[in-house]
Image (cartoon, helix red, strand yellow):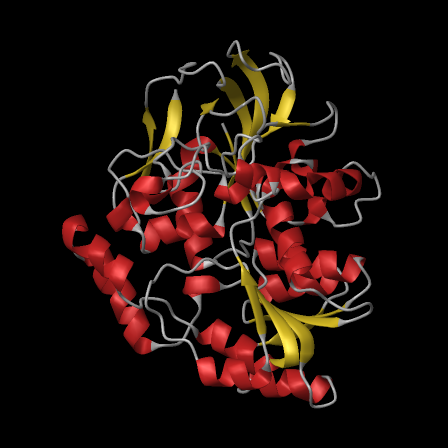
Amino acid sequence: MKAVTWHGKRDVRVEDVPDPSIKEPTDAVIRVTSTGICGSDLHLYEVLGPFMAEGDILGHEPMGVVEEVGPAVSGIRPGDRVVIPFNIACGHCHMCGLELYAQCETTQVREHGMGAALFGYTRLYGQVPGGQAEYLRVPEAQFGPIKVPDGPPDERFLYLSDVLPTAWQAVAYAELPEGGSVTVFGLGPIGQMCARIARHLGHRVIGVDGVTARLEMARRHGIEVIDASEVTDVPGEIRARTGGRGTDSVIDAVGMEAHGSTAAKLAQTLTGLLPGAVAAPLMTNAGVDRLAALNQAIDAVRRGGVISVIGVYGGMTDPMPMLRMFDKGITLRMGQAHVRRWIGALMPLVTDDSDPLGVMDLTTHRLPLERAPQAYEMFQKKSDGAVKILLRP
């Protein structure tokens, strides 16, 4: 089959690789019909190479049609249309019983002290072949796959794999009071959906970004925006719009990609150039994140407010302004999305023909799988108005 494989910094290729097969009784194999490129994939493209191996198959936002199931899988059968959550969970361990599926004890990658295994995302998360491919082996298929109706286009459902539950969790973790206000830093795909979900739930939303296409998309969905390329003091602007207090909550949907911090940018660049054996310990033990967005979130949230971090960070010793956080009484929540936990709330919204979250207005580019290298470059450079790119095997 064809698959998107990693070969080094900014070097992804579409290659022939062996077809997946059933290995465990709880496995399934699906034929992929659509798969997304996530902002997190850009971390593999740029920064997290020390934890990759040449030839690793990328991608964790797939959906498709079931081809084969193992003998212990009864909830799905060949021919079913399914979306695959990006994290791999068993559904029956202690953590799954708490609906903390991203911490599943059956698939935790204990060798590296990490949570549940993820598709297509480094050896830290199990080195499981990903979904930017023609076919995908799905472990723990007795629980993970989400059945969706036949008929509507893939884009109605594909974002249940990651974007929508991640955004829903970010808003839930923000603990907004009724009719409250929230700032969303970063209007990439996750930030777009965070803003739309919060607005759908009746909250005031201020979106912050410096990319014109992202700002325009947010405006189309009724989001109040701040153009960070034109405002020198974003937290000050947010306070000015909220009676001097700041918003009740802030969602950081940026993570390690934030601009700012010359030293952290240099650290990120160095880790991408060093041999893996040297770079991996640096990533594990050093502060390599650009914390500009998180620091602005701390400044922008009102006293006693909540910061919900959904952007991915990669460093282990990043400095935090603890005095400022303590003095303001800030609550900080974060973590990988527990995908299956939020599907019950999201499914009625994606099956509603009125499309209340605008899932049909998120994808900006649809390309064949063979053009994945160009798609990654376009997404990384944010060129040609790229906000969300889908690949079609």
Determine the image quadrant of residue 79: top right
Where residue 138 appears, x then y in whole percent? Answer: 48, 24
Residue at screen point 60% across, 47% down:
163
Where residue 74 appears, x then y in whole percent? Answer: 62, 14
Instruction: Choose between 3 and 82: the one closer to the eye.
Output: 82
Q: Is residue 220 left or right of residue 337?
A: right
Q: Is residue 363 visible?
A: no
The outermost residue toward the front is 94
Q: Is residue 96 left or right of residue 152?
A: left
Q: Is residue 311 left or right of residue 177?
A: left
Residue at screen point 45% across, 80% down:
322
Position of residue 267 relative to residue 84, above or below, is below
Instruction: Choose between 360 and 261: the one closer to the eye.
Output: 261
Instruction: Choose between 87 and 349: the one closer to the eye.
Output: 87
Where residue 308 appears, x then y in whole percent? Answer: 59, 64
Position of residue 383 relative to residue 344, above or below, is below
Position of residue 215 relative to residue 226, above or below, is above
Residue at screen point 69% across, 31% down:
153
Where residue 305 appears, x then y in whole percent? Answer: 65, 76
